[in-house]
Structures are given as structure tokens and as C-alpha cells.
Amino acid sequence: MRIATWNVNSIKQRLEHLGEFLKTSEPDVVCLQELKCTDDTFPRSEVEGFGYHVETHGQKAYNGVAILSKRKLEDVRVGLPGDDGDDHARYIEGVIATEKTALRVASIYLPNGNPITTPKFAYKLAWMERLSAHARALLKHEENLVLCGDFNVIPDPKDAADPALWVNDALFQPETRASFRALLDLGFADALRACSDEGGLYTFWDYQAGAYQRNNGIRIDHFLLSPQAQDKLRSVAIRKDVRGWEKPSDHVPVMIDLDIEP
DNA sequence: ATGCCTTCTAGCAGAAGA
């Protein structure tokens, strides 16, 4: 089974790219972030036309997450528990049942948190605490569990082409990295790091200053796997080529292959 | 030191992103 995550930076602007990606990589499940549209303005019929079931959690102009799946999604939850006052659409999860097993997948758009001197950074750290609490509860099911998406976390200096550029950024603060580490320490594997220790593996390049042409990238889109899912991990791939398409998202799709019959 | 670019909404500029 192939699972992908991709921050599309507006689903309406990226519909053609999504179609091309689905055709060329044939994922069974796709987690999307930054839809930038409401549930009722999501291009549902077009995406269903690509051969996928669709579950969305959108909002006007900002944020918005979705899960696409060739199989129907069950037990869908929208919104991260722990703060009824949080109206950002940043979390959706669902279960894909196959003939032999089941898999729970979450599509995550973790807050950016910049600038770090503002309440946005506190919101980011609080959101990460809530994610850890929810993830801890999910791990108790001891099932195939995949948390993926745009975490807005640079886990390690080798995950940035030029770490010095990020020292004052919310994505690379010690508190941010410690919170991400604590999340992993609940029992998750960072799928890419389970396969490679290499630096230079990026998933985001800024639109500005020719960042992609200079390969000035960062790795912030991640797959976190429960022990049951990690046992089935075959490979991880980053579709870096997609960043070179015309009018691209600033993020590229990342994919894992699990040893599960789709 | 700052903006660089792209998206959104609103309405011909500003916020947000990272």
C-alpha cells in the first residue's frame, strides 16, 4: 500500500498537478494540507473522477486538510481534540480497512508558529502538546497507524540546506524540535530516518530568492509510524521533480510504501 | 538590513505562509 502526503498550497490552484501526481505515482491514500477552501467549495467531483473517495476538513482562505483513498474511509474524525476554541482546520483522520487488515491515517497541518515573539508560537507549541496527547491515545490501539503531513518542524540541522537561516524561525526552535522529539519518543518512527541518515533530503523550497534552483530546502513534511506500521515499511520517496513543474506548490509529495495488500 | 514569491480576500493593499 502506497501512502502520500502533500501540502498543495491551494487545492484549486493545484488540481492539474494533483491529477498528474496521482497518475504518475498511483498512491492508494493521499493526505493533503493547505486546501485553502471550505468543504463545500472543495473540487470533490474532480478528485472523485481521479478514482478516490474524499474526506475533507476545510475552512475559508486558510489551512484545510483532506484524505483521499481508493478504498472508502471509515471512522473519520475532524479536528484535533483538546481545545474547543481552536477553529483552525488542521487535522483529519480516518481508517482504511483492507481484506486482511486495517490502517488508521491522519493528515496533519501543524501550525507554522512565526514570528516566535507572538502568540502564534505559543499556539504552535500548544497544538503540538495536543497532538502528542491524541497520538498517545491512538498508540494504545496497537494498530497500523500513520501520522503524516506538514509538521512545520525541521527536526535536525541536516534537514536544512543552510541551518543558520532558520535559527530564529519557529520551525527550528529548540522547543519545537524537543516537542517533535517527544512525539517520536511516544513510540513513533520518522519513516524517512528509518530508511536513511543522509542530509540533503528536502520537501519544501521557498518561492523566493531562487530557493529551489539553489537547492536551499528544508525537510518539514513527515511520516510518523506506529511500531506495527514501521514493521511493514518498505521505502520512502520524495517527489522532488514536482517542485520543478510550472506554477508548483512550495512543498512536494512524500510517499511511503507499506507491506500491506491495498 | 530587507525583500525576494504565491495564495487568499477584498476591492486596487494586506495578511499569511515558512
Image (tube, grey):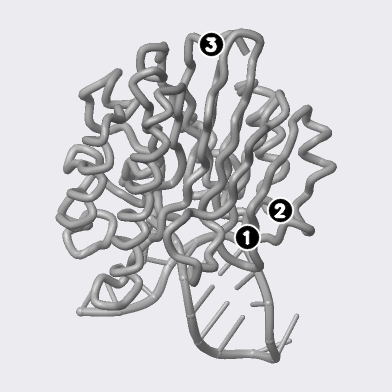
Give the answer, above or below, for where A116 lies relative to A126: below
Instruction: Say whether mark 3 and mark 2 are on the same chain.
Output: yes
Q: Sequence-wise, which precedes: disc 1 or disc 2?
A: 2
Which corner quadrant of the image does residue A70 belong to? Answer: top right
Secondary structure of the residue carrying tag 3 is loop
Q: Sequence-wise, which precedes: disc 2 or disc 3?
A: 2
Q: Chain of mark 3?
A: A
Which corner quadrant of the image does residue A96 belong to? Answer: top right
Residue B4, x across and y down, in percent: 43, 67
| Image depth: mark 1 or mark 3 in front | 3
Residue A210, x across and y down, in percent: 39, 52
Q: Are marks 1 and 2 in contact (CB under 8 Å)?
A: yes
**What separation in Å lies between label 2 and label 3 (alpha carbons)?**
32 Å
Instruction: Tell me the quarter of the image containing the C terminus of chain A.
Output: top right
Q: Is residue A182 left or right of residue B18?
A: left
Q: Nearer the viewer, residue A215 or A194?
A: A194
Residue A172, x across and y down, in percent: 22, 54
| Amino acid type indicated by mark 3 | Ile
Residue A212, x across and y down, in percent: 40, 45
Q: Is residue A153 left or right of residue A2?
A: left
Secondary structure of the residue carrying tag 2 is loop
Secondary structure of the residue carrying tag 1 is loop
